[in-house]
Image (cartoon, helix red, strand yellow):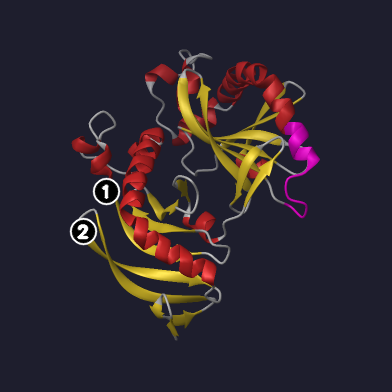
Amino acid sequence: MKDVVFGEMRKKGLSYKKKETFEIYEYDFDVEVEVECEISDIQRNAYVGYKEKHLSYETEILRSIYNYYIDIYDVVEKIMPIPEEYHKDNVKEEDMCDLFDFAVLFFGKNGHFGWICTCGWDDDGIAFLLSEDKPRILTPNQLRNYRKIDDPIFGEMIYNEVWEKSEKKLLYGKEKLVTIAACDYADGITDVHRACYKEYQENEAKYLEEIPRVLLEYYLANFDEIKEYWRVPRAYAKKNITQENIMELIDFDCLYFMYDGTFAWLCECAWDEEDAGLAFVMGDGKVRVELQTDVL
């Protein structure tokens, strides 16, 4: 079909699509333009608006991806080799355009739109929501299924199979970008989720003080099994490990609130070759260590 604004489009599944070439950062990208459901005037206006403002969007995208890259650099470093010019201390804002490629310009049925891009550190890619005051970095799935709420306790949350937001937290001397997530069941975010989040916020210092102690107990109790599949560095040998240095083996990822009132820090750990992950399950001021597979 030929749309009055988008031009020639073809129906594929629940969307209309076409190929188009965009010049971005002085490169030509052959991308797919995708319009969700039946094409509406909201989407047509968004398409026209994007083309009118594309240069300012490109500047804002570089700024947002630079800040995001710095925030997640420790994670990226574990996933892929990083050339020296892209090291945290060397990379510049204008260098970021070399680290991702534009693939799909997506227009949602509710008027939201943005770019879906490929990048070296995430097989699923990365997305830039452009229909708000400033670009927001999402997963491609979040962009395609964009839903946002302003919860009275959690604040602004985005739907991505669970309700979630990103937040910087200072954890054991390091600032870390983590996910705060509430498991979505039939009722979405509930009063149970909210009560648990408030309880965590009120007792966060106590929980963070308790985690090294219970982790050390867990590590020592399971040390013989751990050393069978992990070559234990000398600093973390049974006689050398302490509550202080054991936290070097843990990477905090997500503070997760389940619909049954359980909440936990979900973490990666250095000795976990099967990516099962650890969970620090909290409640009533106490912490216990579980495998994530036993909690989720």
Report the residue marked by disc 1: 97
Say left or right for 139 vs 27. right
**Residue, x 34% and y 39% (percent of image)?**
66
Task: Give whichever of discs 1 and 2 has the lower sequence position.
Answer: 2
Q: Label for residue 230?
A: none
Q: Picture quarter containing residue 259?
A: top right
**In-front residue for pair 220/61:** 61
Q: Secondary structure at mark 1?
A: helix
Query: What is the x, y in percent for residue 257?
Result: 69, 39
Looking at the rendered image, the quarter that the C terminus falls into is top right
Say left or right for 144 vs 19. right
Is 251 one of the magenta-colored residues? Answer: no
Q: Are marks 1 and 2 in contact (CB under 8 Å)?
A: yes
Q: Secondary structure at mark 2?
A: strand
Camera sees residue 27: yes
**In-front residue for pair 220/99:** 99
**In the figure, 110 relative to 161: above or below?**
below
Looking at the rendered image, the quarter that the N terminus falls into is bottom left
Disc 1 to disc 2, how far (Cα)? 10 Å
Label 1 crowd (10 A; few <14 / some 14-19 / many >=20): some
Identify which amino acid the numbered label 2 is placed on.
Tyr
Q: Picture quarter containing residue 49?
A: bottom left
Give the magenta part as a residue range.
185-196
Report the residue marked by disc 2: 27
**In the figure, 58 relative to 264: above or below?**
below
